[in-house]
Image (cartoon, rainbow, N blue to C red):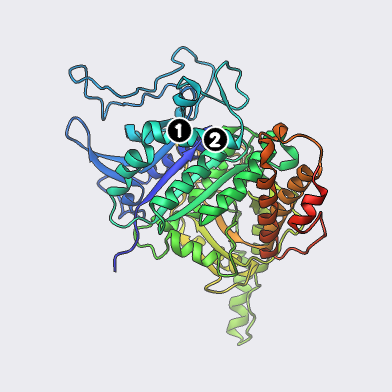
């Protein structure tokens, strides 16, 4: 039986592309053509497409589409040396090459160590709407039109697809060269117009590839921390609309610090994207293994056995805390030997509970900062945990600690140990401190060149997600019951019915995740009409 293989990745907006740059650097690091290289653990064809460069040499290009405004591609040329036909053969397509004179600003393209195919880089533009192909991201000091609202993103996506034929030509070019696709792996910022863009493309993918998995990671902010009414409304609309066409949606926070003692990260795109990419890449690693038994479909089916629980949460720890004694006590071993000689059975101390506590104390949930979590530690409905470490001796204590924390059994949980640490590439930000070169915690604080790191990551569905749903619902109710015009939230005057539908969807979703009705607001459409302002 042929198993699903290829995954096509789509990332929308600068924050998502920062995450994607780290993700693809890790995929690139798995290539090892050395004479003494061991058999690969990762099947490269899952993420890369084989082809030929202009010089006739074999190439491996990421199966990826990266969407961003022209100015955010920085110093990256859309046509690089592998595909540049040279001066004798003119190229009549677009070349993305901007900000050549700016040296003080960094871009996500500065991190990328992978050479992308020209068809991977997609300029977000809508000449038919704005008369120009130049757009700018929200918060940018520019005279160009800025990407601010969910509805704006929807309009841009439709116009862009008509003008550039992305779904019909570009995306199909990637999908037709596959044996049996696993699915589409999407990511986007939810607090600006990219939420509308990604939801529109999810709709298109559902029409073109109805049976293919579509998993989305939404990069979000706490709603009560949103800078403007626009950003809060964008997040609510992105969350609800994404659930209409995505099989799995994982909201993660881009703003909260992590509690890990060996990670010192700031709340900027460079640092936060490195952390989130490490967790995401690790959590989905079983889908790309050479001898895999997991796929995007099996992951989704495991997480959604309880009900239509399409909202998942991402969590983990990096680096993995020490879960076993580095140096066994020689006196303890001597005592055990003496007792054994006298026929006295004395079981060794059970260190699993202590290891599980260290793991629990180091665990960080990347999704819960999206809302004010009120039910931390709730038993998950289902979970897929991935632990990775180059030291095979770490497998037993790690798996024992994981099993002790949540004693779920198959099919509700899967625990995978991969004997391969996370690769730390040169462009990975210097956020690791107090670790050895292979990323293990230690007492020293000397500066070392960290090349790899053991870590643990998981995707789970649990009652905790109702915290996110409740916060989105409360915001929607405040808007419906308030007196501010909808234009202040980036919506049209006639969009009130849209918000009523959003409220009903959130109510249903809240019930799915075990929420208890707290009588917030009228309960029927007729009551909403009576209370309408």
* Residue in view at x 28 percent, y 48 percent: 176
Q: Residue at x 44, y 62 (%)?
A: 297
Q: Dot 2 surroundings within 10 Å: few (below 14), some, or many (20 or more)?
A: many
Q: Nearer the viewer, residue 222 or 209?
A: 209
Give coordinates of residue 2: x percent, y percent. Answer: 29, 65
Left or right: 169 with respect to 315? left
Q: Does residue 152 lie above or below 368 as drawn?
A: above
User: According to the image, label 2 marks what residue?
Assistant: 153
Q: How many marks?
A: 2
Is 413 placed left or right of 185 in the picture? right
x%, y% of residue 310? 57, 59
Q: CA distance from mark 2 to mark 1?
A: 10 Å
Residue 366 marker: none
Looking at the image, can residue 83 be seen?
A: yes
143, 337: nearer the viewer: 143
The quadrant of the picture occupied by the C terminus is top right
At a point 79% along the width and 35% down the height, the residue shown is 484
Q: Is residue 394 above or below residue 343?
A: above
| Residue 357 location, quadrant | bottom right
Q: Front-most of 382 and 425?
A: 382
Tell me where residue 414 appears, x and y as whole percent: 51, 67
Residue under label 1: 159
Q: Is residue 115 above or below residue 205?
A: above
Q: Residues within 10 Å of mark 1 (few under 14, many from 20)?
A: some
Who comes first in sequence, dot 2 or dot 1?
2
Residue 339 position in % (x across, y down): 63, 81
Tell whether label 1 touches label 2 (CB within 8 Å).
Answer: no
């Amino acid at each position: 039986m042929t198993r699903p293989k290829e995954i096509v990745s789509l990332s929308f907006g600068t924050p998502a592309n920062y995450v994607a740059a780290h993700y693809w650097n890790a995929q690139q690091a798995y290539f090892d053509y050395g004479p003494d290289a061991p058999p690969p653990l990762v099947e490269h064809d899952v993420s890369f497409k084989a082809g030929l460069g202009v010089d006739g040499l074999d190439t491996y290009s990421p199966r990826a589409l990266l969407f961003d405004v022209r100015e955010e591609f920085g110093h990256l040329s859309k046509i690089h040396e592998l595909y540049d036909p040279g001066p004798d053969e003119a190229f009549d397509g677009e070349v993305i090459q901007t900000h050549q004179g700016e040296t003080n600003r960094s871009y996500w393209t500065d991190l990328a160590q992978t050479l992308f195919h020209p068809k991977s880089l997609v300029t977000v533009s809508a000449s038919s709407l704005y008369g120009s192909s130049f757009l700018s991201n929200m918060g940018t000091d520019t005279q160009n039109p800025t990407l601010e609202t969910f509805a704006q993103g929807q309009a841009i996506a439709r116009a862009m697809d008509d003008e550039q034929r992305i779904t019909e030509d570009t995306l199909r070019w990637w999908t037709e060269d596959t044996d049996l696709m696993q699915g589409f792996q999407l990511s986007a910022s939810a607090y600006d117009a990219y939420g509308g863009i990604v939801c529109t493309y999810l709709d298109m993918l559902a029409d073109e590839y109805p049976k293919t998995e579509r998993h989305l990671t939404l990069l979000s902010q706490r709603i009560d921390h949103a800078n403007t009414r626009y950003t809060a409304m964008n997040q609510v609309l992105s969350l609800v609309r994404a659930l209409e066409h995505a099989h799995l949606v994982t909201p993660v926070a881009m703003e909260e610090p992590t509690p890990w003692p060996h990670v010192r990260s700031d709340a900027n795109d460079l640092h936060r994207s490195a952390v989130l990419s490490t967790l995401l890449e690790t959590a989905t690693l079983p889908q790309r293994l050479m001898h895999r038994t997991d796929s995007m479909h099996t992951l989704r089916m495991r997480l959604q056995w309880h009900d239509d629980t399409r909202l998942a949460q991402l969590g983990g720890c990096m680096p993995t805390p020490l879960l076993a004694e580095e140096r066994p006590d020689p006196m303890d071993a001597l005592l055990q030997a003496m007792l054994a000689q006298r026929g006295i059975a004395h079981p060794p101390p059970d260190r699993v509970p202590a290891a599980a506590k260290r793991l629990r104390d180091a665990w960080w949930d990347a999704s819960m900062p999206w809302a004010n979590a009120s039910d931390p530690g709730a038993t998950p409905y289902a979970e897929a945990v991935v632990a990775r470490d180059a030291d095979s001796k770490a497998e037993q204590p790690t798996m024992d600690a994981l099993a002790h924390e949540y004693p779920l059994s198959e099919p509700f949980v899967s625990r995978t140990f991969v004997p391969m640490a996370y690769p730390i590439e040169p462009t990975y930000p210097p956020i690791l401190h107090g670790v050895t070169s292979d990323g293990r915690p230690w007492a020293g604080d000397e500066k070392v060149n960290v090349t790899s790191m053991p870590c643990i990551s998981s995707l789970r569905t649990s009652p905790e997600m109702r915290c996110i749903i409740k916060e989105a619902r409360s915001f929607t109710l405040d808007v419906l019951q308030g007196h501010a015009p909808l234009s202040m939230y980036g919506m049209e005057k006639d969009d009130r019915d849209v918000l009523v539908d959003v409220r009903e969807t959130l109510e249903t979703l809240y019930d799915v995740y075990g929420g208890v009705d707290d009588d917030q607001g009228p309960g029927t459409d007729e009551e909403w009409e009576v209370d309408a302002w």
